[in-house]
Every structure is written in C-alpha cells, then in structure tokens.
C-alpha cells in the first residue's frame, strides 16, 4: 500500500508540475494587466499541497516560481516588472520570484491538514485555495519591498505613499480576482479529489 501511495503521489506531483508548465507557457496561467499579472498558477500549487502535503506544495510552488523567474528574461512570456528587476539584480530577482512561492506551497500543506480537522473537506480545500492566493500576494509583495524597496524603480512606484497603502493600491483587483478564483476552483477540485479518496486521511 505504501508503495502504491508513493507512486500515486509522484504521479500527481508530475501532473501538477506539467499543468503549471502548461499554464505558464500559454495564456491559461497569466492575465497581464499593467506591471502585474493575475495568475491562476496558485491553484495547482494549492491542489498539490492538498494531495501531497507540505513537500508537494513546496515543489509545485518551486515550479511556479521558476516559471515566473524565467518570464523576467522573456521565456514563456514577458513580465514588465520582472524584466526591470532582473536588470537591477538577477540574483535578487530569482529570490523574489521563487522563494515566496516555495514558502506558500509548503505552508499550504500544513494549513490544509489543520483546516481538515476542523472543517468538512470542501471548506478545507476552499480555505486552502484562498490562502494560496493570499500568501502568494503577501509573500511576493513583501519580498519585492524587502529586496528592492530602496531602488529608484521601486521608489518611483511607491511615490511617497505609505507602504500598506501602496501594496493595496498596487495589487488591487488583481489580488481579489486571484483569491476568488483560487477559492472557488480549489474548493471544487480539491473536494472532488477528497471524495475520490485521492487525498488520504493522513493529510
């Protein structure tokens, strides 16, 4: 049973990684609006965390982060902000794009386990989907301000505003759309996987 479970988990991780790559390199994954983009890649990360726990969530988050970083150099699309950040400091651009997504996926695995003990499967999955989008925005923007906040580029964007006001106005409708779509779709997909017994009780 343990061997079969491990095979299933590896298969699911490969499937989620393939979906992330497909979404990253087609219009399915990003809806670019101005310097930011509405991303739907938080949904496979949440599903990976639900099915595979913290490790699977972290791996899927890493794949998401790598595809986001590659967009800084025009691979799989172009990120206007990413290109500027890469020109300023490529290493910091890598950290800013990848680390928040790995942390997001890793935390989601633990959060789903907690939510599932106190809620039904659908609600646990829906809350995990919401947190996937929320944490993605929170960690992404925190890393952006921490690593690039003193640069001329970021100072121009902030324009003397309070940091919290800047973040809220900058992410705006993008973050709201991500949270709504991730909550609904992760709840539906994750709930179906739970009913199909693909998500084990140990999760």
Image (cartoon, rainbow, N blue to C red):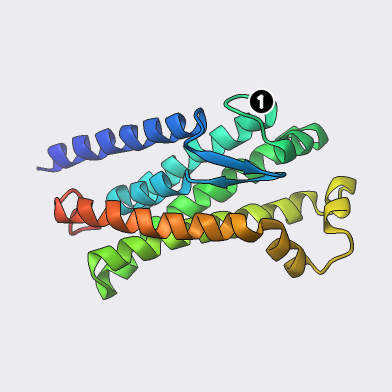
Q: Classify residue 51 as left or right of residue 3.
A: right
Q: Where is residue 19 in the image (x, y as percent from the top left)?
A: 38, 34
Q: Please count the marks in the image.
A: 1
Q: What element carries label 1?
A: loop
Q: Nearer the viewer, residue 198 or 158?
A: 158
Q: Position of residue 174 (x, y in %)?
A: 60, 54
Label 1: how many residues lie within 10 Å, few (<14), some (14-19) or many (20+)?
Answer: some
Residue at the far left in the pictured view: 1
Residue at 68 percent across and 26 percent down: it is 73
Residue at 28 percent across and 49 percent down: it is 51
Residue at 35 percent across and 54 percent down: it is 186
Specify whether residue 69 is in view: yes
Q: Classify residue 123 as left or right of residue 167.
A: left
Residue at 68 percent across and 32 percent down: it is 72
- Work out whether 64 lies above or below 191: above
Q: Classify residue 117 as left or right of residue 29.
A: left
Q: Where is residue 96 in the image (x, y as percent from the top left)?
A: 66, 45
Residue at the far top in the pictured view: 75
Q: In which quarter of the image is residue 9?
A: top left
Specify whether residue 142 is in view: no
Quarter occupied by the C terminus: bottom left
Q: Position of residue 42 (x, y in %)?
A: 47, 48
Q: Nearer the viewer, residue 177 or 109?
A: 177
- Work out whether 40 lies above or below 124: above
Q: Classify residue 83 as left or right of residue 22.
A: right
Residue occupied by mark 1:
74
Q: Quadrant of residue 59?
A: top left
Quarter occupied by the N terminus: top left
């Amino acid at each position: 049973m343990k061997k079969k479970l491990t095979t299933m988990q590896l298969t699911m991780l490969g499937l989620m990684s393939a979906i992330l790559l497909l979404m990253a390199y087609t219009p399915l994954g990003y809806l670019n609006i101005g310097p930011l983009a509405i991303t739907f890649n938080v949904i496979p990360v949440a599903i990976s965390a639900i099915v595979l726990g913290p490790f699977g969530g972290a791996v899927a988050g890493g794949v998401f982060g790598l595809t986001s970083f590659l967009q800084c150099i025009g691979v799989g699309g172009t990120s206007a902000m990413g290109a500027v950040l890469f020109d300023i400091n490529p290493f910091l651009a890598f950290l800013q794009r990848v680390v928040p997504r790995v942390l997001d996926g890793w935390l989601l695995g633990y959060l789903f386990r907690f939510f599932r003990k106190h809620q039904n499967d659908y609600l646990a999955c829906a809350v995990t989907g919401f947190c996937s989008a929320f944490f993605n925005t929170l960690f992404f923007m925190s890393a952006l301000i921490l690593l690039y906040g003193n640069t001329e580029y970021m100072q121009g964007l902030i324009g003397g505003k309070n940091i919290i006001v800047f973040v809220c106005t900058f992410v705006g409708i993008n973050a709201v759309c991500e949270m709504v779509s991730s909550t609904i779709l992760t709840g539906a997909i994750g709930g179906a996987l739970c009913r199909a017994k693909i998500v084990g009780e140990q999760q």
